[in-house]
Amino acid sequence: MIFFKKKKIKEEETSESSLDAPEILPEALTDDPDEVDTPVEQSPADDTAPDFPVPDVTEPLGATEEPPVIPAVNGEESVSPQADENIASAEETEDAEVTDCSMTSPDSAGEDTEDAEDTEDAEDTEEDTLNDFERSIRDFSADDIDATVKSGEKKRDMVRLAVMVLCVCVFIYSTSYLIINIPDKITSDRIYADIIDSVADGFGVEGTVSAGGKVDLLAADSKTAYTPTMDEIIKNGAGEVTTHSDHSAELAKMRASLESLRNINPDIYAWIKVPGTNINYPVAKTDNNEYYLDHAYTGDNLVNGSIYADFRCVLPITENYNTVLYGHNVTSGSMFNHVTHFFKPEVFENTNIYIYTFDGIYVFKPFSIHEAAYDSGYVDMGFDAEEFVAFATELAEMSDIKTDVTFTPGDRLITLSTCTNGISTQRYALHGVLIETITE
């Protein structure tokens, strides 16, 4: 009995010592390396093995998928700190999933709908308070700038294209005009050169031969009064006209030249000559002011036309308060192009205008040179005595070069009118007052 008890006691001690032996854990499972339990070496004499498996401390860390289980203490199972962290992480993930699911709950969706409606109401209220300008500023974007830039570039391209087309049209027109008119201009120069060579010697009287200077042949309205011819004046001794026999031969030659021109064309009215210029042409006249715009003095078609008198003019010239002559401003220098020379004071002050007719030679001194609209009245002809003086005075005031000339009802004027080659309705006008009459 004693032996049995001892043996039993020994077995119990052995069993208790086995249960009380601390477990040997890997070093990585503890937070403090110094606290790692050193494995207890079993006494060789103790052949008794523990009742539960002891983990192999030589096994690599992380070799097992699950953390080792620490033996139960006081009947409760215990796990390592790493296992606790894994469990806590898993719980947090589950809570997050639950939270995500809760966001789609009906109550939350309703709140979101209410918030959206409140936002829309606020936007509608703000929209109502904006004026058109503020709304345009708000809606303005970079795309609008790009669209504006592109629109501006498109307009500029269209303007450039229109200008280019216009330039091409002007070039084509100018080229066509030159091609068509150059032959006519050559013909015109030849025609008038020939006539000047043949009859111009008859129009060479340019001296001052009138003893009394200005003549006063008309005191009444030219529309009703009768003015005698030069022959009647000479015969009856009317006016202040002196006969100079030393010019009889020149006057006879002048009349012969005019007669030869009338044999070519009965519309010949006179001859005009301005010393120091290219103005030296026959003057035609018909019953309108258009025909001789594009017809030579011979009646042939000609682009340069002729120098011609207004259809209202009569002979003798002294019956006209204002004798009006027209001619083209040909850029080559022919016809009335040299009227523009009278804008120079040295020409204006020292050049007279000579008109040769069957009745005699009439000398006019320039008193006005200016630009005027074609319908401004500078070519008016019908006046009474008072109206005529006001008309002549107004022409003098319009001049680019001023003079001290004064007028009486007995004065007579001449007007040379030509285009400006600029605005189609504008004209250059040169006006002269009769200062001398040359007769036999």
Image (cartoon, helix red, strand yellow):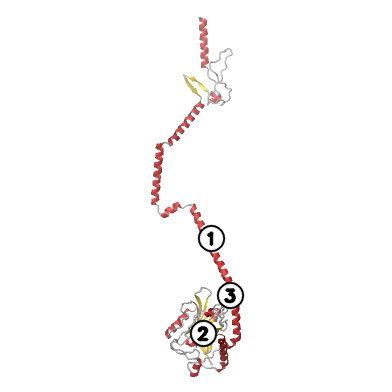
95 shown above or below 22: below
Image quadrant holding the C terminus, namely bottom right
* Extreme residue in the top direction: 1
Quadrant for residue 46, please give it: top right
Mark 3 Cα within 10 Å, few/some/many (few <14, many 20+)? some
Residue plotted at (51% across, 16% down):
19
- What residue does disc 2 label? 365
Q: Nearer the viewer, mark 1 or mark 3?
A: 3
Q: Which residue bears the numbered disc 1?
A: 157
Determine crowd level at label 1: few under 14, some 14-19, many 20+ residues with C-alpha closer than 10 A: few
Question: Of 213 and 200, which appears nearest the observer?
Answer: 200
Q: Nearer the viewer, mark 2 or mark 1?
A: 1
Q: Note whether 252 is above or below 371 in the view shown.
A: below
Crowd band around label 2 with a 10 angstrom C-alpha radius: few (<14), some (14–19), many (20+): many
Mark 1 or mark 3: name the one nearer the start of the chain: 1
Label 3 residue SS: helix
Marking on residue 76: none
Q: Is residue 78 visible?
A: yes
How far is mark 2 from mark 1, CA to CA? 56 Å
Percent coordinates x, y for residue 336 in the rendering: 55, 80
The three-letter code of the residue at mark 1 reads: Asp
Tell me which amino acid carries mark 2: Lys
Quarter of the view holding residue 161: bottom right
CB under 8 Å between discs 1 and 3: no
| Residue wearing tag 3 | 181
Which comes before the other along the chain, label 2 or label 3? 3
In the foreground, 81 or 326: 326
Q: Is residue 351 visible?
A: no
Gap between marks 2 and 3 measured at Cα = 35 Å
Name the secondary structure under disc 2.
Answer: strand
- Residue 22, given in percent of the width and then of the height, sits at 52, 19
